[in-house]
């Protein structure tokens, strides 16, 4: 068992990393909900909504197979920053395109695929860089803590927030999008706080 002095949070580098990633996971969770809602808003098609989730998950799974190998061959920090910058640019392009009424479905689908690939590469760099931030005695604990926090945010929080906020109507439209978003954000925040303990 690790003492308080050997805790993963004894490392200032890991503390900064943990806080930054907790906020990042909240943003990723909101993006995972917001982009399919944007596609549904533009197309009014449940099929397009389902296809959007496929485009978010399938490229992530395939690119994840090589993400770790890529992170071992190049500078992890540069890889993670580059992936986050590309994701930032794509989300900004989505927002500007929606605001100027120039956002099209092929542009959205292409951006979603690139977002998923970048997320997989980022995760490959993230997972393999954690041991270098802390002392060797707490490496296993840090990997488990990061993995649990991510699982809490991406799987349990979204479902819980959506259930509390309400279920979809039979017409396929969400009853109250703001309430769904608030429910998700609340439980994502609670998930990140519980991951810190």
Image: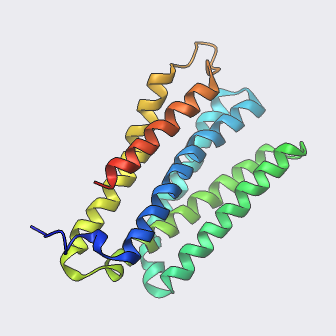
- Report the colour scheme: rainbow
Looking at the image, the residue that sits furthest to the front is 5
Instruction: Residue 107 in the image: state x and y as whole percent.
Output: 78, 51
Residue 58 is left or right of residue 40, and the answer is left
Q: Is residue 108 above or below residue 144?
A: above
Foreground pick, 39 / 3: 3
Identify which residue is drawn at 59% across, 35% down.
50
| Badge count | 0
Quadrant of the frame with the C terminus? bottom left
Q: Is residue 130 above or below residue 63?
A: below
Looking at the image, the residue that sits furthest to the left is 1
Identify which residue is drawn at 58% across, 25% down.
179
Instruction: Residue 87 in the image: state x and y as whole percent.
Output: 65, 62
Q: Quadrant of residue 81?
A: bottom right
Identify which residue is drawn at 64% across, 14% down.
171
Residue 130 is left or right of residue 32, and the answer is left
Instruction: Residue 33 in the image: state x and y as whole percent.
Output: 58, 39
Looking at the image, the residue that sits furthest to the top is 170
Identify which residue is drawn at 62% across, 42% down.
52
Foreground pick, 112 / 96: 96
Quadrant of the frame with the N terminus? bottom left
Q: Is residue 173 above or below residue 122?
A: above
Instruction: Residue 143 in the image: state x and y as whole percent.
Output: 29, 66
């Amino acid at each position: 068992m690790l003492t308080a002095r050997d805790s993963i949070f004894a490392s200032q580098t890991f503390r900064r990393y943990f806080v930054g990633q907790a906020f990042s996971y909240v943003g990723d969770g909101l993006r995972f909900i917001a982009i399919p809602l944007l596609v549904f808003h533009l197309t009014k098609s449940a099929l397009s909504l389902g296809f959007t989730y496929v485009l978010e998950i399938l490229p992530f799974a395939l690119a994840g197979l090589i993400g770790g190998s890529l992170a071992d061959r190049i500078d992890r920090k540069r890889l993670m920053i580059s992936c986050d910058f590309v994701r930032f640019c794509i989300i900004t392009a989505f927002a500007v395109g929606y605001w100027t009424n120039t956002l099209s479905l092929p542009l959205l689908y292409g951006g979603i695929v690139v977002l998923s690939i970048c997320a997989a590469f980022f995760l490959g760099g993230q997972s393999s860089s954690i041991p270098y931030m802390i002392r060797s005695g707490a490496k296993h604990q840090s990997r488990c803590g990061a993995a649990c926090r991510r699982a809490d945010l991406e799987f349990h929080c979204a479902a819980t927030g959506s259930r509390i906020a309400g279920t979809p109507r039979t017409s396929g439209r969400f009853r109250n999008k703001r309430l769904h978003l608030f429910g998700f954000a609340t439980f994502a925040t609670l998930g990140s706080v519980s991951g810190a303990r």
